Image: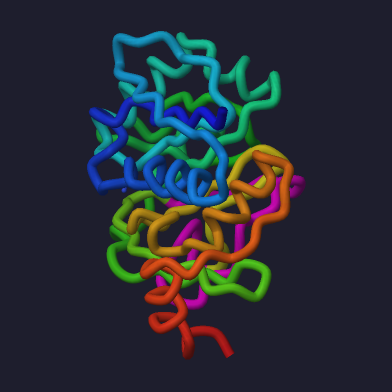
Amino acid sequence: MLKVALVYPELLGTYGDGGNAVVLVERARRRGVDAEVLRVGIDDDMPDASIFLLGGGEDGPQRLGADLLRASSFSARVGDGAYVVAVCAGLQLLGHSFAVEGDDEYDGLGLVDALTRRGERRAVGELVVEVEGHALVGFENHGGRTTLGDSLAPLGTVRRGVGNDGAVDGFTTSRIWASYAHGPLLAMNPWFADVVLERVLEVSLEPLATTADLLYAERTRTLID
Ligand code: GLN
């Protein structure tokens, strides 16, 4: 059973990122894999799950989300081998610290060597990132700019928009994928949902030809040369 934990959707769900959970579960089921979404509310314990999803959020909810995550078993579960897909506020709070209203260095979880400071102006608009020759598309809306330590690899190269700093977007480790792209990310980029599923399930998947896959191909045909 693939258990997909959707973490604090009431805090980190402003931009519809909860759709990422639906996409993972549905694409797993279409390959004959039993899968379910575990909704983790702010009063719930962190469940035992294969993968945890963190979405975007406004500054206040992001700060509360970081506090609750710090007090939970989330980091221990990641240390024990769980996977994480994180978007925007979720991305920022995985690092050492991030900027929220009234505080430029609010403590993150420190799971990765990344730091988010306030940018000069908000990054709002379309985001296109090249990830291993694929276009990863979505939209961004954030005030923070993220700097990665030397040993932390970005998820990809920004072709349009800002991402972390105008040059690269997100980060990736053997267990974590993080991006500034909303959409939701995995609905807009079905190939990327399959990259995640293949790693988590330790299988190799045949492509699907759902409407989402076909629309992705049409939308992105000319985005990356
Ligand atoms: N509050 C964060 C920022 O503005 C994240 C916003 C978001 O998740 N879209 O940088």
Quadrant containing the N terminus is top right
Quadrant containing ligand 1 reads: top left
Query: Farthest front residue?
Result: 32
Residue ID at (29%, 68%): 125
Q: Is residue 55 visible?
A: yes
Residue ID at (39%, 63%): 188
Colour scheme: rainbow
Q: Is residue 41 above or below residue 53?
A: above
- Please name whichever residue, 167 or 130, is drawn nearer the observer in this view of the structure: 130
Quadrant containing the C terminus is bottom right
Q: Is residue 124 above or below residue 53?
A: below
From the top left corner, tell me how far across and down residue 32 is, in percent: 56, 44
User: For this view, does 125 lie left or right of residue 223?
Assistant: left
- Please name whichever residue, 182 or 28, is drawn nearer the observer in this view of the structure: 28
Query: Farthest right residue?
Result: 151
- Please name whichever residue, 124 or 121, is drawn nearer the observer in this view of the structure: 124
User: For this view, does 43 lie left or right of residue 167?
Assistant: left
Q: Is residue 117 visible?
A: no
Q: Is residue 179 above or below residue 157?
A: above
From the top left corner, tell me how far across and down residue 153 is, in percent: 70, 52
Q: Is residue 10 magenta?
A: no
- Please name whichever residue, 118 or 191, is drawn nearer the observer in this view of the structure: 191
From the top left corner, tell me how far across and down residue 139 is, in percent: 33, 63
Q: How many marks?
A: 0
Q: Is residue 157 magenta?
A: yes
User: For this view, does 159 lie left or right of residue 104?
Assistant: right
Residue ID at (39%, 58%): 187
The stretch of residues the image draws in magenta is 145-166
From the top left corner, tell me how far across and down residue 162 is, in percent: 43, 66
Residue ID at (37%, 43%): 22
Q: Quadrant of residue 167?
A: bottom right
